[in-house]
Amino acid sequence: MCVTCGCSDTGAVTITDPASGELRVLTKEEHDRMHAEGYHVPHHHGTAHAAIYGPGSTHEHAHATKPAPLLTAVHGTTIALEREILSKNQLMAERNRGWLAARGVLALNLVSSPGSGKTTLLERTIGDLKQRVAISVIEGDQETANDAERIRATGCKAIQINTGAGCHLEAEMVGAALATLDPPANSLVMIENVGNLVCPALFDLGERAKVVILSVTEGEDKPLKYPHMFRASELMVINKIDLLPYVNFDIEKCIAHARRVNPNIQALRVSATTGAGVEEWYGWLEESVLHRSHNV
Amino acid sequence: MHELSITRNVVAIVSEHARARKILRVTLEVGKLSAVMPEAIRFCFEACTRDTPLEGARLEIVEIPGSATCRDCGAEFALYDLVARCACGGVNLAWRGGDELMIKEMEVA
C-alpha cells in the first residue's frame, strides 16, 4: 500500500465516472511523481532548465512552485529542514481551493463513521435542492461504485474514488476527481469521505468546511472518543433522529461533548429518512455557505 | 493507519533533500495532541526506509507537549487532551503547541 495517501501499491486508486462508465486508474507514475515531487505544476524542461540543472536533469532540484527547501542552517552535517510533514497534501489542497474559488464552486467534506447515513442524506438533499442549486458529488470508498450509482440515480453527477486499502481521501485524488467531474460555476460539490472518524481529520482536501455526520445509533460520547474529527469540523449533523424512541442516546449530552472539543461547532438534528429537520440543514447550506461566500 | 502515510511523507521529503547523500539521522517534532503516535511511526520507519537514502538512519522524535492560552481569561496552561478546560471554566482555547507534525532536521554523511 502506498502510505502517502493510503492507496494501494498496485495503482488501485481509481476514479470512476458512472455516467460514462469510464474508469481511470491513477497510474503508478502519476502517483509516484506526485508523491516524490510535491505535486508541483508540470513544466517544460527546456534549454533554460538544462542550463541551470544540467542536460537531462530529472527532478532532483527545487522548484519555485513548491515551498522552497528550507535549508535554513547547515551545521557540519546537520541540515535544518523545518518542513511540515503533510506539506505536500496541503499544497495540493490549496490548489484545489483555488480551482474551486475560480469557478465559484463550494465544496464540503462530509466525514463520519461507516453507516451514519451520509449517502441517504445526500440523496434527499439533492432531491430537494436540485431546482435551487446544481450539486455534484465525489464519493470516496475503499471498494465498489455503489454510492456513486445511488447518487447518479438522483440525476446528479457523481464520481467514485476507490482508495483500495486506503482509509481516507487526499487532496490529489480530489483534484483528479474535480477535473473529471467538471462542476458548473456557482454550484455545490459534496465530497463524501471514506467512512472513518480518524484519518480524514488530518487531510485537507481543499474544502470550504468539514461537516461531521453522527447517527443516534452510535454512542453520544463519540465526540470525546474521536475529538480530532469534531475539532476539525464546522458543523455536526445528528442523523436518524426518527430512531430516538428506540435507542439510548442523549442529544443534548452529545452536543455538549462536541462543544467541549470544539466550542464553535454548530449542531443540527435531522432524519434523512423521514425528512425531519432537513430544512435547517438546507438553511445552513444556503445561509452559512452559499450566501456568505457567494451571494448566489 | 495514518502513521504509515506520515512516515512515507517523511521519507519522501527527506529523500528529496538528500540528493543521493546517505542520511544518518532524521529528527521529527510530533505534538502530543497531533493524533499521531510516535511508536507507530517508529514501527513503520524501518519498512518505509528500505532501499532509500534513509535506510539505517536513526529516527529521533521530539514530542512537543500541548499548551494553550484561554481566550476568556488569558491564562496560559499545559494541555493534556483535547477536552481540557481552563481553570476559569473557559473552553475557548488558543493552542500554543501540541499539534506539530514537522521534519526539523536531518544529518547527512
Image (cartoon, grey):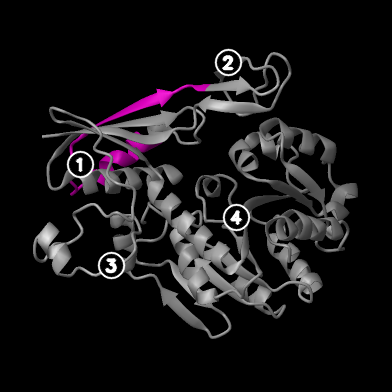
SS at badge 2: strand
Q: Pick the residue in front: A55 or A268.
A: A55
Q: Position of residue A96 (x, y in %)?
A: 49, 61
Count neighbours of disc 3 (C-alpha within 10 A) and say few if under 14, some if 14 to 19, many if 20 or more: few
- Gap in angstroms between the C-alphas marked 1 and 4: 34 Å
Q: Nearer the viewer, mark 3 or mark 1?
A: 3
Residue bearing the label numbered 4:
A195
Q: Which residues are magenta?
A: B40-66
Q: Position of residue A49 (x, y in %)?
A: 17, 63
- Mark 4 and mark 2 on one chain: no
Residue A145: x and y in percent read: 56, 73
Tag 4 secondary structure: loop
Q: Chain of mark 3?
A: A
Tally of marks: 4
Residue B35 position (above or below residue A52): above
Contact, CB < 8 Å: mark 2 with mark 1? no
Amino acid type of the residue tagged 1 in the rendering: Leu
Residue B36 circle label? none
Frontmost of labels 4 and 3 is: 3
